[in-house]
Amino acid sequence: MKKMIFKCAAVAIAAVAALALTGCSSGGSAEAGGAAKDEVTFGYIADFNGASVHAIAQELKLWDKYGLKVKTPVFTNGPLQIQALGTEDLDFGYIGPGAMWLPAKGEAKVVSVNATGNGDRVIAQAGINSIADLKGKKVAVPEGTSGDMILNLALQKAGMTMDDVEKVAMDPATIVAAFASKQVDAAGLWYPLISTVEKQVPDMNILASNKDFVDEVAFASGFVGANKFVEENPETTKKVLQVVREALDYRAKNLEATIELTAKMMKLDLETVKVDAGNGTYYTAEELDSKIADGTVGSWLTGMNEYFVGAGKVTDPKDPKDYFTSELFTEAGK
């Protein structure tokens, strides 16, 4: 049992500039007189990609089914979860593509792919019509996230670097408020946060999206585990992956129902969550097994490694086979 209680972070999704705080929740608990359950702490981000598997597990009581007692603290981004994994305040977590450089550095294990996404954008105030127009402008971005990633890619494509803009590191909720009040000229951000911005700044421009780079890099999100926990607790890790696999199957086959469950769990507007969900590709566990076997997932991670090297995030990334525990994932399905 961990001695340290991880504080819940404010999450950037609401109809106002800052988002409502989302409380920590428990995905399962041992019944009175029942068998003892393995205890794990599994973080998430309060958007569709980050929370939908948790919403399914909660609704279908998958934690109980696989003998797990789970605490599910919410975070605003992936790097914070990697940090919590390293301090043993978290056993598992969810990260978007922008934080995948941290497992590539050896700071965590990727235990499962979650989805590939198309929800990231470079947005700009009215009158800024191209990436080239950002030269010298104030651009907000959450460090080490997919917002950072999409901005880097867009600048590279335009023959520019971060040195050509005034980069301002902000957390996601602050970016929403700063953009709405025109304190920044542009931002690297993602849906559903952009849905909030669009309501407040309807004349904003979208300068770049994931689709612009589909031939260069896959924006794959995933679930990660603490190096020590995964190594020392293979059976518990298998149970967690059994939950994840079953939830992935349900989501891929019941997307509309999953959108409703996720909106309900996070107390968010259904249409906002639906827009968010529309920016991802979701796979069944069997489809991921096939993509692991044919090398597709490995190529996704290798491509992202190459991007991170070019972006200066990491100089010598590990081979995906050294940080993606693909055998554990597929074994959990047998």
Image (cartoon, rainbow, N blue to C red):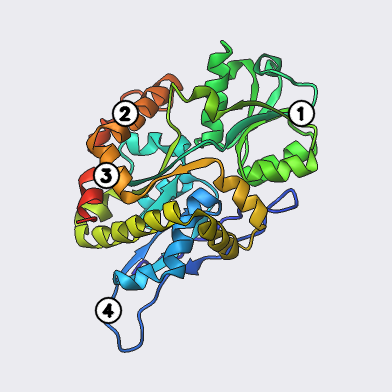
Label drawn at residue 125:
1
**Residue type at numbered disc 1:** Gln
Location of residue 315 by image quarter: top left
Q: Which residue is mark 3?
A: 289
Q: Nearer the viewer, mark 4 or mark 2?
A: 2
The residues bearing labels 4 and 3 have C-alpha atoms spaced at a distance of 31 Å
**Residue type at numbered disc 3:** Asp
Location of residue 318 by image quarter: top left
The residues bearing labels 2 and 3 have C-alpha atoms spaced at a distance of 14 Å
Q: Is residue 305 left or right of residue 174?
A: left
Q: Is residue 314 visible?
A: no
Q: Which residue is mark 2?
A: 299
Residue 220 vs residue 163, the one in the foreground: 220
Q: Under tag 1, what secondary structure?
A: loop
Local crowd size for mark 2, using a 10 Å CA cut-off: few (<14), some (14–19), many (≥20): some
User: Which quarter shows the C terminus?
Assistant: bottom left
Q: Is residue 180 left or right of residue 229?
A: right
x, y (%) of residue 49?
50, 49
Q: Under tag 2, what secondary structure?
A: helix
| Residue displayed at 49% across by 35% down | 144
The residues bearing labels 4 and 1 have C-alpha atoms spaced at a distance of 55 Å
**Residue type at numbered disc 2:** Ser
Local crowd size for mark 1, using a 10 Å CA cut-off: few (<14), some (14–19), many (≥20): some
In contact (CB < 8 Å): disc 3 and disc 1: no
In contact (CB < 8 Å): disc 2 and disc 3: no
